Image: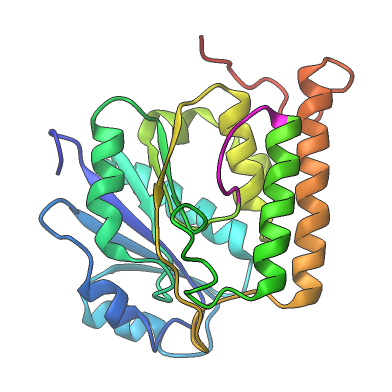
Amino acid sequence: MLNAKRVVVVMPAFNAEKTLRQTYSEIPFDIVDEIILTDDGSSDATIAVATELNICALKHSENLGYGANQKTCYQQALNRGADIVVMLHPDYQYSPKLITAMVAMIGSGHYDAVLGSRILGGGALIGGMPVYKYISNRILTAFENLLIGSKLSEFHTGYRAWTRDLLEALPIDRCSNDFIFDNQMLAQAIYANYRIGEISCPTKYFEEASSINFYRSVIYGLGVLSTAISFRLNKMGLISTKLFEKISILN
């Protein structure tokens, strides 16, 4: 716990057998109360490793998609009384040691969400991010900041922390079950005027770290552009789409 708030780490997992133990070993258990892992139809021993580590583990009988995995993770965290939920990939791409800092930023009362940015600090390329991914990340983020009216360094990180209030308020069930889920959920949070902070996070790219291929990256990029354009048109009152309709706007 931190400031009397229950902290739950959720792990959307797919074939994470080789990296789960290392990720788990660096989690700061002085503030983390529970870990929940959802296995999205893995073909390896992810569930067996999670059970060995005494992690609360759920399993989809088939692969439902990255977004669907997160929906299960977040709902389970809320069901188990989480006040602050941190999404940490079990592939060891993001540093678990930053959980304390991310939770503290939310616990301070200044932020409703915190993102672990691979761009802040300039370590993305050093950590092995492919050049084409880095360039597309920067271009898409600039486009989104322009249309959405935000000033984030990165929209595409998978390292995120949320308050319970935000997770209960946002209609994330309307977001995609695929990789674009992350982007759509963040757009919803900004649409509702939630306060979003960022922290610099080193990243690691290696064989076991999850990463979508070039074709899926292109599909993701098109989804990002569509989400940003839809955001702006909804804000202007020109259209009303399911992703943004009836979202309660904070003052």
Compare residues 132 and 40 and report the one nearer the observer: 132
Per the rendered image, the range of residues in magenta is 148-155
Apparent side of residue 57 relative to residue 140 in the rendered image (left or right): left
Colour approach in the figure = rainbow
As drawn, the residue found furthest toward the right would be 238
Residue 177, can we see it?
Answer: no
Task: Note whether residue 39 is visible.
Answer: yes
Asked whether residue 123 is drawn in magenta, I would say no
200 left or right of 221?
left
Q: Quadrant of the N terminus?
A: top left
Residue 91 percent coordinates (x, y):
43, 76
Vertical order, 115 against 133 (above or below): above
Q: Is residue 248 above or below residue 69?
A: above
Identify the residue at horizontal 70%, vertical 43% (top origin). Answer: 142
150 inside magenta stretch: yes
Residue 133, given in percent of the width and then of the height, sits at 68, 68
Q: Give the x, y percent position of residue 218.
A: 81, 65
Question: Which residue appears at 35% of the width and 46% of the height?
Answer: 85
Q: Residue at x 58, y 40 (%)?
A: 186
User: Which residue is situated farthest in the top direction here?
Assistant: 251
Main SS of the magenta part reads loop
Horizontally, residue 167 falls left or right of residue 1, namely right
- Number of callouts in the render? 0
Residue 35, compared with residue 163, is above or below; it is below
Task: Choose top left, top right, bottom left or bottom right for residue 69.
Answer: bottom right
Given the current orientation, which residue lies at the most extreme left position? 30
Residue 237, horizontal then vertical, whole percent: 83, 15
The image quarter containing residue 81 is top left
Q: Residue at x 23, y 40 (%)?
A: 104
